[in-house]
Image: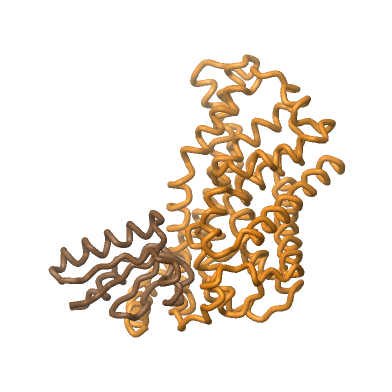
Amino acid sequence: MNTTKAIDSTQSSTSRSNLGVWLAGLPLATALWFFLYWHLDDFANAVISVFGLTRDTHLGEAVHFFFFDTPKVFLLLIGVVYIVGVIQTFFSPERTRALLAGKRLGVGNTLAALLGIVTPFCSCSAVPLFIGFLSAGVPLGVTFSFLISAPMVNEIALALLLGLFGWQVAALYLGLGLSVAIVAGLVIGKLRMERHLQDWVRDIHAGNAVPAVGDEMSWDARLRTGLHHVREIVGKVWPYILIGIGVGAAIHGYVPQDFMVSIMGKDAWWSAPGAVVLGIPMYTNAAGIIPIVEALISKGAALGTTLAFMMSVIALSLPEMLILRKVLKLPLIATFVGVVGSGILLVGFIFNTVL
Amino acid sequence: MKNIKVLGTGCANCKTTLKLIEEAAKAKGVEVELEKVEDLPQIMSYGVMSTPGVVVDGKVVHAGGIPPKEAIDSWLGS
């Protein structure tokens, strides 16, 4: 404890002078961001004219698509990930746990699903987090709401949906993802499944106090953390995005528009359950799945079916079950998959009917 | 001699953390006893919620993410 205190104080004393740099740099960066965002079409047109192409040809259209969508998606990704990265410095897992401890079902589930978006979360920490929450008195159902929402409703998914489909689809995804997390947690809480935790988990009591990172951070450090977050996330997902948009550009205009209608269209009632089941053994992050989603939708797949597929791939995965097996007994895992799967399925049906 | 434990179930960040501490100790010429704890019940007994966690001489000094270089240097002490 003493050591961390010492570091914090030296860090803030050396970095306080840098806050001025941030205050000048951030507005500049924001202005540059908007300037670039407003000139995306000019940029893509300039690129195709350099190649001597026009948008009347298949090739010209494909190249335009690629050079319009790629910078757009990256700009949105950088913007959203930076903002979320700064917000996350206010929500350490320890603080989130303290906010949720002792909360009743209902209010607690809603709060947990919302906190799932802004609490820094790495899927490899899922199990320690799960036990840490339970041992501090966070109810099982509330813990599940957090664990479902955290990976599914994340800044990468939202930034990509925003870039490729517009804010309406991004907002719908946000709302429905939160609803699935809240309702699934409520159901699991009502079922009183505490006895299906592995025995050693129930024996652990609230751990000793761990230094909460982020409580005494300076603004300078928070703004810098946002930048680290951008570097880490964008550094990890850029190949998926490039490949995804590249594939999207290549089939743009070459594959018939109604190619997917008979398989994943609105009238195929079995397509939504099929998509959910298909998504469970598949595991990839949001960055890997969304370009595929875009290709499916542009070729006539129904939006509800496709979003159900995407949620199923991200939220339910076999490797995750194997890790959860260490802390949950089989009936609880089966309930978890069943409840979350049904929730996603419902979302798919609602989307397909309403839109 | 300091005893340093890195707590983590084997994700990429945990391995990186272990390597960074190893390198820092070598660079400073400090002898440390470095351990990697992968057993879940044991990790939980330290009350750490986000991995990797770092324990120096039985005290949790870090949890969640790769620790910054200044932090590692301060654990190794002078």
Quarter holding the N terminus of chain A is: bottom left
Residue A91 visible? The answer is no
The color chain B is rendered in: brown
Please tell me whether residue A216 is drawn above or below residue B36 in the rendered image. below
Q: Give how far across and how far down residue A245 sits, in percent.
A: 56, 32
Instruction: Say which of A9 and B6 sits in front.
Output: B6
Please tell me whether residue A297 is drawn above or below residue A90 in the rendered image. above
Residue A295 visible? The answer is yes
Give the side of residue B30 with respect to residue A290, left or right.
left
Q: What residue is rendered at 66% in x and 68% in y?
A: A112
* Number of numbered discs: 0
Coloring scheme used? by chain
Quarter holding the C terminus of chain A is: top right
Q: Give how far across and how far down residue A145 sits, in percent.
A: 67, 64
The color chain A is rendered in: orange
Please tell me whether residue A353 is drawn above or below residue A121 in the rendered image. above
Q: Give how far across and how far down residue A304 sits, in percent.
A: 77, 41
